[in-house]
Image (cartoon, rainbow, N blue to C red):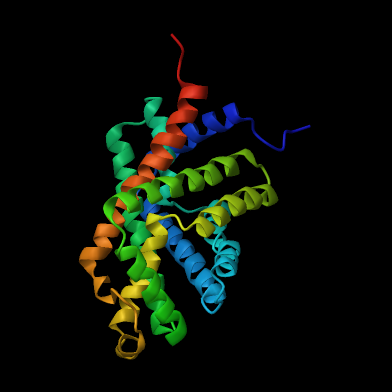
Amino acid sequence: MDKMILSPAEISSYVEEVGVKKATNKAYKTFLLAVLAGIFIALGGFAAGMASHTIENMGVSKVIAGIVFPVGLILVLICGAELFTGNNLLTVAFFKKKITFKQMMKNWTIVFFGNMVGAVSLTTMLYLGGALKPSLGTYAIKVASYKCGLDFTTALFSGILCNIVVCLAVWGSYAAKDVTGKIFIGFFPIMAFVIAGFEHSIANMYYLTAGYISKMDSYLNAHSAIEKMEKIDLTHIISNLIPVTLGNIIGGGIIIGGIYYLIYLKESN
């Protein structure tokens, strides 16, 4: 009888194998898969905001958002896509010397900007399609204003915490051999990171773009009495994405990928 779940050691070897495949995939395929992942994550962010933005109780609002947002990662895991934060686990194949640093950085670069294209494109379509209605647009401005106001250290460590959780979800999904198992392991950790409010670089591409576009809307600009709204500009958006992205790499690539590599894959002397 076939096993329904991989052991931790088997997962580690599988992550190494997946890392080699991802790093050697054709650039255009990687980019298109990354665009899809950006769309999926942005869709999860939009749906979570739509479901929770009118709930006044902060705790309940976060729980509702946490229940809805994981649809983004579940689509990535089941349908197939290239997500930057999950691909931070390519460090496992790099530590094993199965791929080069150049190959890893090439994959990360293509996937990061592919995710950005997907997230920004979907957010723009949502706005043009009238989905970012006044109440949700105001909520988007509020979220983006908060994120743009984070200092470097806070954004960095929140990014580290976020991708520890996200990469554990991705890592755990490799253990499951059926759709139900992958959905369950992809759901609960992501729900936890959303409720905790950690910073995810690709999700922020949606949230920051939604806030920026909504801020440009003349009606929302006139009716949104939100402090520090002026911080939602390209400079502050980049100032958020840089530390959050670095934190995501540290959390997923160094802490999760590195520790599991040392435990299961590093050859002993």
**In the visual, does 62 lie left or right of 155?**
right
Residue 157: horizontal and vertical position, in percent?
Answer: 37, 47
Is residue 144 shown to the viewer in this render? yes
Residue 256: horizontal and vertical position, in percent?
Answer: 46, 36
**In the visual, does 72 lie left or right of 27?**
right
**In-front residue for pair 42/79:** 42
**In the visual, does 115 lie left or right of 152?**
right
Outermost residue toward the top in this view: 269
Dividing the picture into quadrants, the one containing residue 200 is bottom left
The residue located at (34%, 91%) in the rendering is 219
Residue 127: horizontal and vertical position, in percent?
Answer: 39, 81
Q: Is residue 142 above or below residue 28?
A: below
Outermost residue toward the left in this view: 235
Residue 138: horizontal and vertical position, in percent?
Answer: 40, 81
Q: Is residue 131 above or below residue 210?
A: below
The residue located at (58%, 65%) in the rendering is 68
Is residue 120 shown to the viewer in this render? no
